[in-house]
Amino acid sequence: MYCPHPYRYAVMQMDPVGMISHFQDPIATAAAQAIRPKKYLVYLDYPVDLPSVTCKWFRYDVSLIGTTLRPEDSANGLTSDMVVPIFPNTSGPREPVRPYPSFPFPNCYHWLDCGLLVRIRRPEMRFDHSCSFHLETRQHFELAQLFMEDHARARRAVDERLAQDIPQPAGDACDANSESNAIEEAVIVDDGSLRNGRESSVGSVDSVSDAAYSSINSSYDSVDALFLMDPLGLITDDAVESIPLVDMWFELEEHLTVDTITNPMDVIEEVNTTVQIIRDARERAPSTKIPVNDSLFNFHSDSIRSVVPPIEEPTYAERMPSFIYQRILKISQLEVEQPAAKRANLTAKCPTIWRTLKRMVARMVHLPPRQPECAHPPFLPFWP
């Protein structure tokens, strides 16, 4: 496959020079060449684009892998225990995930909120998934469930901190029974009305219409969100040039060792520096075209041949056995040499041969011959 499969571990390295190559700007090129991109250990979450052999890159959501516990981020409610170890690493607050085959590094963790949207460049040769380390689908969703719980815990921590920081006037103190009182005020009584004085019929129409309106809006939002993801590559995104363009490999041990796995936080500096170079180049050349990825719908035969070699199909003579081919040649030669009378006699026998052949096929499929002027059962096959 030209597009890497999800749920796999890989090595990623950003290409700053490739990200600014469409500007043809010597200043930007020199600045990009001064960046020394590092190699990072990542986990492929899921692709954003539909794969095509004509795509120059594939947008992918990846998660960076660390070798320590996660740095705390009190502003966002993140703590150091919001990690999941990768077996054979067993030092952590949770049971480790177990890739297959056995993971080569004994000190790695999945971090919460350490994701990055990248553009994986399509290689000249296809990705070799046979040497990749991957998680089973069940373990991938178990990992996602653990991080969902961490997200909920982080949100609660942020909400509690904000509630403590916001001063509340004495007259507007929160009542412990305010929520239950609000629910009691909305209870429908026997006479069909609400306790707040609104008639139940009016309230029902308004509530139904509001629910329908919100449902329609939510459905439109879902459709808009799907098109904004642009899985078919039909939209020219102005921000695509700022998405990191990376090379990726599945041969982990050929590019990294236990001691050379890079801190995931280092990629932030690389991305920010490259994005600033792109912004400066855009200011100098605002009319430069945004790089466009070949989508699933704009490929043609020449582009297909450039990545897929043509297949030479054998001729009919090469497909059939030699003795059958020789027999056909002999029959053809005899037909040419036969006199016109024999050919006319053979032509007259064709209807009889055809009727005989139909009877033989009918016996083989256990279908009775059609009776003249007799209606056949509906929806059953018959021979004319």
Image: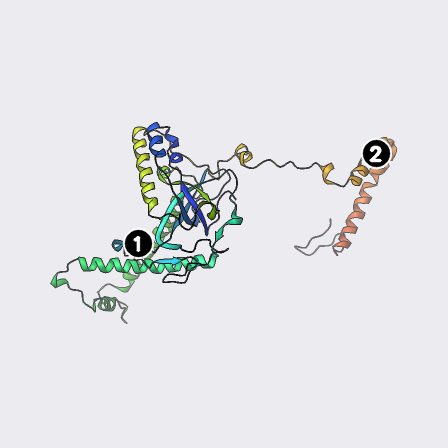
The image position of residue 97, as x and y in percent, is: 43, 59
SS at mark 2 in the image: helix
Mark 1 highlights which residue? 71
Q: Quadrant of residue 274?
A: top left
Q: Nearer the viewer, residue 40 or 224?
A: 40
Mark 2 highlights which residue? 335
The image position of residue 371, as x and y in percent, is: 76, 54
Res 369 seen here? no
Residue type (three-letter) at the residue carrying disc 1: Pro
Q: Nearer the viewer, residue 145 or 200?
A: 145
Q: Residue at x 30, y 28 (%)?
A: 284
SS at mark 1 in the image: loop
Colour scheme employed for the rendering of this structure:
rainbow
- Left/right of residue 193 with respect to residue 319 in the rendered view: left
Q: Are marks 1 and 2 in contact (CB under 8 Å)?
A: no
Res 20 seen here? yes
- Left/right of residue 198 with respect to residue 286 in the rendered view: left
Q: Is residue 186 above or below residue 79?
A: below
**Local crowd size for mark 1, using a 10 Å CA cut-off: few (<14), some (14–19), many (≥20):** few
Q: Is residue 86 above or below residue 184?
A: above
